[in-house]
Image (cartoon, rainbow, N blue to C red):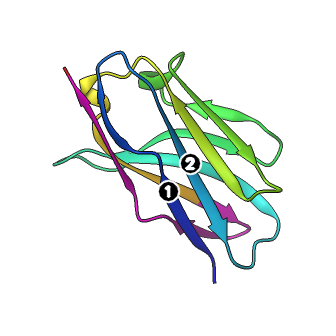
Amino acid sequence: QVQLVESGGGLVQAGGSLRLSCAASGSIFSISAWSWYRQAPGKQRELVAQITSRRTTHYANFVKGRFTISSDNAKKTVYLQMNMLKPEDTAVYYCNLVLGVRDYWGQGTQVTVSS
């Protein structure tokens, strides 16, 4: 059984920074990709950033130049460094881990950016 636990969310003023972490536990083999998604109230969940096993990264246009995804597979952890935060970044952020043909989700961490 694989479990993901996010941390690092909170309240920050616009222009500030937060660093999210997501630690995985359980039987983890052959990591395909880590991703961060977010879901704001009344909106659909959307992809924020992804990093593959080959360290290829992909970012949603709305975070390019502000957010950085990184991973430490030895520690089974993925990070999301969020800089220059905007009120529209307010959402619950979820990490996602793809292992072969299965994927797993964390419980989410709230990020609130005040104007």
Q: Quadrant of the C terminus?
A: top left
Relative to 101, is 9 above or below?
A: above
In depth, the one of 95 and 102 nearer the eye is 95
Task: Say if the magenta span includes residue 100.
Answer: yes
Q: Is residue 57 left or right of residue 40?
A: right
Classed neighbour count for the residue bearing mark 1: other residues with Cα under 10 Å, few (<14), some (14–19), many (≥20): many
Q: Residue at x 29, y 19 (%)?
A: 14
Q: Residue at x 50, y 19 (%)?
A: 66
Residue 64 position within the rendered picture, expressed as x and y whole percent measured from the top left: 52, 20
Q: Residue at x 79, y 38 (%)?
A: 55
Q: Secondary structure at mark 1?
A: strand
Residue 23 position within the rendered picture, expressed as x and y whole percent measured from the top left: 62, 60
Q: Main secondary structure of the magenta part?
A: strand
Q: Quadrant of the N terminus?
A: bottom right
Residue 33 position within the rendered picture, expressed as x and y whole percent measured from the top left: 69, 52
Whole-Å distance between the Cαs marked 2 and 1?
6 Å
Q: Residue at x 35, y 50 (%)?
A: 45
Q: Is residue 20 left or right of residue 24?
A: left
* Amino acid type shown at disc 1: Glu
Q: Which residue is mark 1?
A: 6
Classed neighbour count for the residue bearing mark 2: other residues with Cα under 10 Å, few (<14), some (14–19), many (≥20): many
Relative to 33, is 100 above or below?
A: below
Q: Secondary structure at mark 2?
A: strand
Q: Residues in magenta?
A: 97-114
Task: Say if the magenta span includes residue 26.
Answer: no
Residue 56 position within the rendered picture, expressed as x and y whole percent measured from the top left: 75, 35
Q: Are marks 2 and 1 in contact (CB under 8 Å)?
A: yes
* Amino acid type shown at disc 2: Ser
Q: Which tag, 2 or 1, sits closer to the chain's start?
A: 1
Q: Which residue is mark 2?
A: 21
In which quarter of the view is residue 99 placed? bottom right
